[in-house]
Image (cartoon, rainbow, N blue to C red):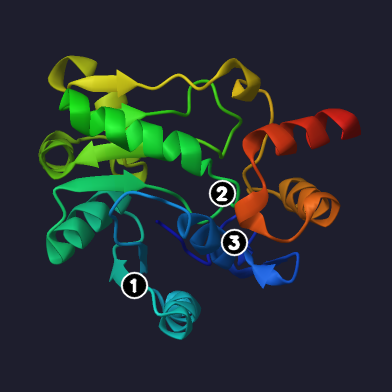
Amino acid sequence: MQARMGSTRLPGKVLMPIGGMPLLEHILRRLETFKLSALPVIATTTLPQDDAIEEFCRKKGVSCFRGSRENVLERYVRCAEKHEFDQVVRLTGDNPFTDMEELEALVSLHLKEGADFSHSFASLPVGVGAEVFTLDALHESLEHASLPHHFEHVDEYMLEHPEAFRTLVHQAPETKRHPELRLTVDTLEDYERACAIVNALGSDIRALTTERIVKQCMRCA
């Protein structure tokens, strides 16, 4: 899970409180329901401002990796190498409503089909989907990446070079297909929306399904 305090539009958002707990803690609580074998790691930068994230990880007993601020792709590669991962699930620290059911389906399908790169963000609300990569695919991306956005965004090289990777796109059920909805936290408006959802539906983030959140957003639209 990539996370940093230095967001341009909403600084410190990953530790901002939603329903009485930091945003990152909401994600970790959702991951408690993940039924497949996985080790959560929060990958942040070496900047002093991200000491707060490392301290949060220490208190919560979560692994923390610190790497490059600018080269996020390299940060993922080095983190995966350190932990000897051959498969990497990418989540981001500004998405408190990641759909665990769809994540399990995505990872299972990725492994079954032997894909290099799989994702489920095409049809789900913004901030609800996820991605899975093999370490080999990340290595290849890092080796051949040449443009600034290839390093800033982990998936950009793969998306731009589909011929080089076995790519799998997981489609969510019809009831969850609302790509027009923003359930990420990138701006103050997004943050206020996330707070309103938790206040309306309850602070147990593990019980907030995508269907319930979509219905709540439709009522408030």
* Badge 3 amino acid: His
Badge nearest the viewer, 1 or 3: 3
Visible residue check, residue 4: yes
* Residue 32 picture location, percent across and down: 47, 60
- Which disc number belongs to residue 26? 3
Mark 2, residue position: 95
Left or right relative to 29: residue 115: left
Cβ–Cβ under 8 Å for marks 1 and 3: no
Mark 2 falls on what kind of element?
Answer: loop
* Residue 119 picture location, percent across and down: 37, 29
In primary-sequence order, the first of circles 2 and 1 is 1
Mark 1, residue position: 64
- Could you give the CA–CA distance between mark 2 and mark 1, rounded to whole angstroms? 18 Å
* Residue 52 picture location, percent across and down: 50, 80
Mark 1 falls on what kind of element?
Answer: strand
* Badge 1 amino acid: Cys
